[in-house]
Image: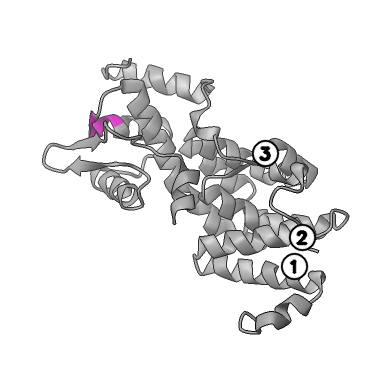
Amino acid sequence: TERGQDMDDEEVNVWEDNWDDETHESEFSKQLKEELAKNGHKVQ
Amino acid sequence: IENCGPLYQEFSMADKVTYNYYLGRKAMFDADLPLAEKSLNYAFRNCPRDCMSNKRRVLIYLIPVKMFLGHMPTHRLLHDYKLDEFEEVVEAVKDGNLGRLDRALEQHEKFFIKSGIFLMLEKLRSITFRTLFKKVCSLLGGSIFLLEVFLCALSFAQVNDVDVCELECIMANLIAEKKIKGYISHQHGKLVISKKQEAFPALSSISAAI
């Protein structure tokens, strides 16, 4: 029989949709911020 | 097979999984991502858990399709199915780090080409651009940005072959795909993003709307 949409917890949680609004700052983000500031762009 | 009506229900699950696997692969190459996602997802979910190597085979195609639609595979999934080649690619796309993405694709080029997904993975550059632009906008704040700022960010991300014309082209495509809500003022060399609504909507919300 076919498996229902929410039957298998293990397989439902293997995809992440909200990766975009993670609040933690990556090393890349921090360096990007410094780079923009260094080039005279006003960083918040 | 799609025209066989009620007869389809008589097929064994193994056949349905196989059919959906090939249907999904074909849809991916035809750039019909919603159909690719639906078919490959079906194949993945209905393939028994003890058939790890078959499930892994499905994932090789399902992962790039899902990523393009804004659903990122978790570290655990990649690890469980020994698909560590994707790890760097996923991190780079999530971070908007184009240089890292290019290096990750180059590093595992053979595996990706052999699997037939290299070109699909290259398409992930466009959503990586989006994430980088989103970061720039949130770092600077406001809703009007000089295009120069993005060029500065691109060169920081080790993208050295994009000039202002190409930048406008990349942005125009993202706007057309509704991945950025805003417009480019070519005359003033600026990007103006929406103040009223989320200017960079979650990718998964866009794909859900298709």
Host chain of mark 1: B
Q: Which mark is residue B17?
A: 1
Q: Say which amino acid is labelled 2.
A: Asn
Residue drawn at (26%, 35%) of the image? B193
Q: Which mark is residue B46?
A: 2
Q: Say which amino acid is labelled 1.
A: Val
Left or right, B145 with reference to B54: left
Label 2, label 1: how far apart the Cα atoms are: 7 Å
Q: Is there CB contact under 8 Å for labels 2 and 1?
A: yes
Residue drawn at (43%, 33%) of the image? B157
Q: Secondary structure at mark 1?
A: helix
Q: Does residue B23 show up magenta in the picture?
A: no
x and y percentages locating residue B121 in the rendered image: 55, 53
Label 1, label 3: how far apart the Cα atoms are: 23 Å
Left or right, B52 with reference to B162: right
Left or right, B88 with reference to B151: right
Q: Quadrant of the C terminus of chain B?
A: bottom left
- Which range of residues does the magenta coloring cover? B144-149
Between A6 and B202, the one lying in front of the other is: A6
* Same subunit, tags 3 and 2: yes
Quadrant in which residue B163 is drawn: top left
x and y percentages locating residue B111 in the rendered image: 68, 55
Q: Does residue B146 show up magenta in the picture?
A: yes
Q: Which residue is mark 3?
A: B74
Q: Is residue B131 above or below residue B127?
A: above
Of badges 1 and 3, the one in the foreground is 1
> Is residue B110 among what the camera can see?
no
Q: Which mark is residue B206?
A: none
Between A44 and A34, the one lying in front of the other is: A44
Local crowd size for mark 1, using a 10 Å CA cut-off: few (<14), some (14–19), many (≥20): many
Q: Is residue B46 above or below residue B188?
A: below
Q: Is there CB contact under 8 Å for labels 1 and 3?
A: no
